[in-house]
Image (cartoon, rainbow, N blue to C red):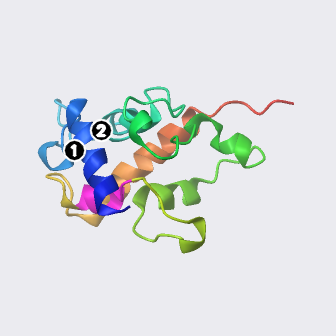
Amino acid sequence: MRTSARLLLLTALAAFGVTPVSAQTGASPDGSRESGKSVFTTYCASCHGESGRGDGAVAIFLRRRPADLTEIAVRNKGTFPAERVYQMIDGRQAVKAHGESQMPIWGDAFAKSATGGDERAVKAKIDAVVAYLESIQKAPVR
């Protein structure tokens, strides 16, 4: 993501009250790990919307509308590509053929957060989001 686009996104996130990654904790108030829905709501919903349909409050500031994450399986002939979704969220192994992404590199962000630093914690957080996204997929139309 270009520096100016990243700055615009961070400014928009701040305007909508999204807490910076470094200020958030990775545990629920009861000390348990965050659920995938909780991680999604905290990090993804500002762009992708609470329901994952690409209609988040920040979406209007982006060049391209964020993807409707409830249709990942539909776009993949009924199969949810968990590993590919994981890689897209992580973002540290960019696929140049797919072009520039406006999506933050969450693998780096999670690793640098107050709860990150540990690659297992980063993997657990991304795995939780992937599992949540799989759970909200629309059924294929037959």
Give the residue displayed 56% in from the left and 34% down from the top: 135
**Image quadrant where one finds the C terminus:** top right
| Amino acid carrying mark 2 in the image | Glu
**Image quadrant where one finds the N terminus:** bottom left
Q: Tell me: residue 90, above or below residue 13.
A: below
Give the residue displayed 29% in from the left and 47% down from the top: 8
Q: Is residue 122 left or right of residue 129?
A: left
Q: Is residue 101 left or right of residue 141?
A: left
Dots 2 and 1: beta carbons under 8 Å?
Answer: yes
Any part of residue 89 in sight: yes
Q: In the image, which disc is placed on residue 26?
A: 1
Q: What residue range appears in magenta?
A: 104-111
Residue that label 2 marks: 34
34 drawn magenta: no
Give the residue displayed 29% in from the left and 57% down from the top: 4
Residue 68: x, y in percent? Answer: 58, 37
